[in-house]
């Protein structure tokens, strides 16, 4: 008998098993490397956006409106987090602004489960929703907040995918309407300014000024300096800036933000105001001691009152309560020959 | 015998690919550190350029030099940092110094006692400045003799935090 067959020896089985194991390891390594590269891209993108927020800050301008472009076919999600300040002398006296991103990929899962490493900044105040997604660009509006001296630049951010509809901007916000519509041309940046809520896009976030309608998402009461988020029925306070020509940075910040983030940033702004007050107290004492610069005699007690109140700021309500001290400082500083600020 | 040869070959292969992997990851991590350093330096450069608009340094006492750095405020912050660490990590910088370029003053560090007969205010000191990003700025200070503000030319020196 002539038997024809193939002997599948142990050596062959062993080789096939080991080969399969090596191929499995190689494929696993490739996927891990892809994940690592994606995390690197996510982290780099977050840091780049954070760094780009520095030149956006204002110098002499009342406001600055720019776009941060996202590379084509790389939709980006930006995560914005705020850490409350721990107070002067603490570990984190100014609080922290945390930014992280995720970039959409065509390989593997569209979005990574976890964002890239967070980039932290102590000197930036970003007002945006916790999670914003841009197809091509993020719009950034920067405005100085004076209280009564410049405390910080309020940086407001929203994505191209998210529409806003400002409804019935009345006489009480006519300067703001003129600035947004005519000077900044914000209607080209996904924001509609309309006279009736029926003119809004269905998908847009409806911001009603003064009068509440059933479809409103946010109610703005500019004269009372407050904004109400109607879905959660939470109210935040939006104190006017001391610059009468540019009163509404906090109001705009509240519209584009979320209640908890807005309150956290308000606390951080309070901490910054307190530190700046200390600088001005020192400057005032120094100038009194070394020159005839006569700003000093009138201000120290007002500054110290301001400082004590600013150190206690924990949310937007507390920030709004500081307004009287801010106005008092402004009134005392204005007529001086040698102004402190 | 053949089994033994195959086993040795497989061990050799695994060792070879492990070494390739180590080399690849070493190069990749080096590239990552370079990228992180580049971003930190870019941040320091942008901060240099924007220093005069920072509320801690902006000169706002008079409207004729809105892009000036207020030297008295800078001096007070440098002083504050000696007693409190609040501003130490505020700008995310390793080194921050403001230097007067013209008119040249005495080449000494400014304090409350010798100001303005000095030419530099070191706000954040560093033992070793790795990569400096200087930017020219206008400086403003109160001049007791003329009872008015005096404007001078200066430079802001910053250095990014080292990436570890």
Image (cartoon, coloured by chain):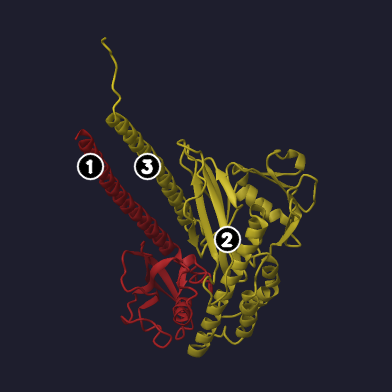
Chain colours: A yellow, B red
At a point 50% along the width and 38% down the height, the residue shown is A109
In the picture, which quadrant includes the C terminus of chain A? Answer: bottom right
Callouts 1 and 2 close, C-beta under 8 Å: no
Which circle marks residue A29 in the picture? Answer: 3
How many labels sit on residues? 3
Q: Residue B6 falls in which quadrant of the image?
A: top left
Chain letter, disc 2 residue: A
Indicate which label's residue lies in the foreground, 1 or 2.
Answer: 1
Q: B142 or A143: which is nearer to us?
A: A143
Which residue is the extreme one toward the front? A1
Callouts 1 and 3 close, C-beta under 8 Å: no
Which circle marks residue B12 in the picture? Answer: 1
Q: How crowded is mark 2: few (under 14 residues within 10 Å), some or many (20 or more)?
A: many
Q: Is mark 2 on a helix, strand or loop?
A: strand
Q: Position of residue B124 (x, y in %)?
A: 40, 74
Q: Where is residue A159 in the image (x, y as percent from the top left)?
A: 57, 46
Whether residue A63 appears in this view of the structure is: no
Q: Distance between the residues labelled 2 and 3?
A: 36 Å
Which residue is the extreme one toward the top? A1
**Residue B98 shown left or right of residue A100 in the figure:** left
Q: How far apart are marks 1 and 2 (CA)?
A: 52 Å
At a point 39% along the width and 40% down the height, the residue shown is A28
Indicate which label's residue lies in the foreground, 1 or 3.
Answer: 1
Q: Where is residue A236 in the image (x, y as percent from the top left)?
A: 71, 61
Read off the residue under disc 2: A82
Q: Is residue A310 above or below residue A8?
A: below
């Amino acid at each position: 008998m002539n038997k024809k067959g193939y002997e599948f020896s142990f050596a062959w089985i062993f080789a096939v098993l080991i080969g399969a194991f090596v191929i499995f390891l190689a494929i696993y390594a490739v996927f891990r490397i892809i994940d690592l590269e994606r995390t690197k891209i996510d982290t780099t993108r977050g840091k780049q956006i954070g760094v780009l927020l520095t030149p956006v800050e204002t110098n002499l301008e009342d406001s600055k409106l720019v776009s941060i472009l996202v590379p084509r076919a790389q939709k980006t999600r930006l995560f914005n987090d705020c850490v409350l300040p721990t107070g002067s002398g603490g570990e984190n006296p100014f609080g922290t602004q945390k930014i992280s991103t995720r970039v959409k990929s065509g390989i593997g899962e569209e979005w990574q489960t976890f964002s890239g490493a967070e980039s932290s900044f102590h000197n930036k105040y970003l007002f945006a929703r916790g999670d914003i997604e841009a197809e091509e660009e993020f719009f950034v509006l920067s405005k100085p907040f004076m209280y009564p001296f410049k405390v910080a630049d309020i940086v407001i951010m929203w994505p191209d995918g998210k529409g806003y509809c400002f409804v019935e901007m009345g006489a009480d916000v006519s300067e703001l309407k003129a600035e947004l519509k005519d000077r900044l041309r914000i209607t080209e940046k996904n924001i509609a300014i309309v006279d009736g809520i029926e003119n809004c896009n269905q998908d847009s976030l409806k911001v009603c000024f003064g009068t509440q309608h059933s479809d409103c998402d946010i109610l703005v009461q500019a004269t009372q300096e407050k904004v109400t988020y109607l879905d959660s029925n939470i109210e935040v306070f939006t104190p006017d800036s001391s610059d009468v020509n540019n009163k509404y940075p906090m109001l705009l910040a509240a519209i584009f933000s979320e209640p908890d983030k807005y309150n956290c940033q308000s606390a951080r702004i309070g901490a910054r105001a307190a530190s700046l007050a200390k600088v001005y107290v020192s400057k005032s004492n120094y100038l009194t001691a070394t020159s005839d610069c006569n700003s000093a005699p009138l201000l120290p007690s007002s500054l110290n009152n301001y400082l004590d109140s600013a150190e206690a700021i924990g949310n937007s309500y507390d920030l709004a309560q500081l307004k009287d001290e801010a106005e008092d400082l402004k009134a005392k500083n204005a007529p001086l020959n040698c102004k402190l600020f | 015998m053949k089994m033994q040869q195959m086993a040795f070959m497989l061990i050799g292969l695994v060792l070879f690919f492990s070494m390739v992997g180590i080399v690849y990851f070493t190069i990749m991590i080096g590239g990552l550190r370079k990228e992180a350093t580049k971003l930190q330096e870019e941040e320091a450069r942008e901060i240099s350029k924007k220093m005069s608009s920072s509320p801690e340094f902006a000169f706002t006492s008079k409207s004729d030099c809105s892009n000036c750095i207020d030297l008295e405020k800078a001096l007070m912050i440098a002083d504050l940092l000696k007693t409190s660490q609040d501003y130490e990590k505020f700008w995310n910088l390793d080194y921050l110094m403001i230097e007067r370029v013209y008119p040249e003053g005495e080449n000494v560090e400014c304090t409350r006692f010798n100001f303005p007969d000095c030419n530099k205010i070191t706000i954040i000191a560093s033992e070793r400045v790795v990569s400096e990003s200087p930017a020219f700025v206008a400086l403003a200070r109160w001049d007791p003799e003329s009872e008015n503000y005096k404007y001078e030319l200066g430079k802001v020196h910053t250095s990014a935090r080292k990436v570890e």
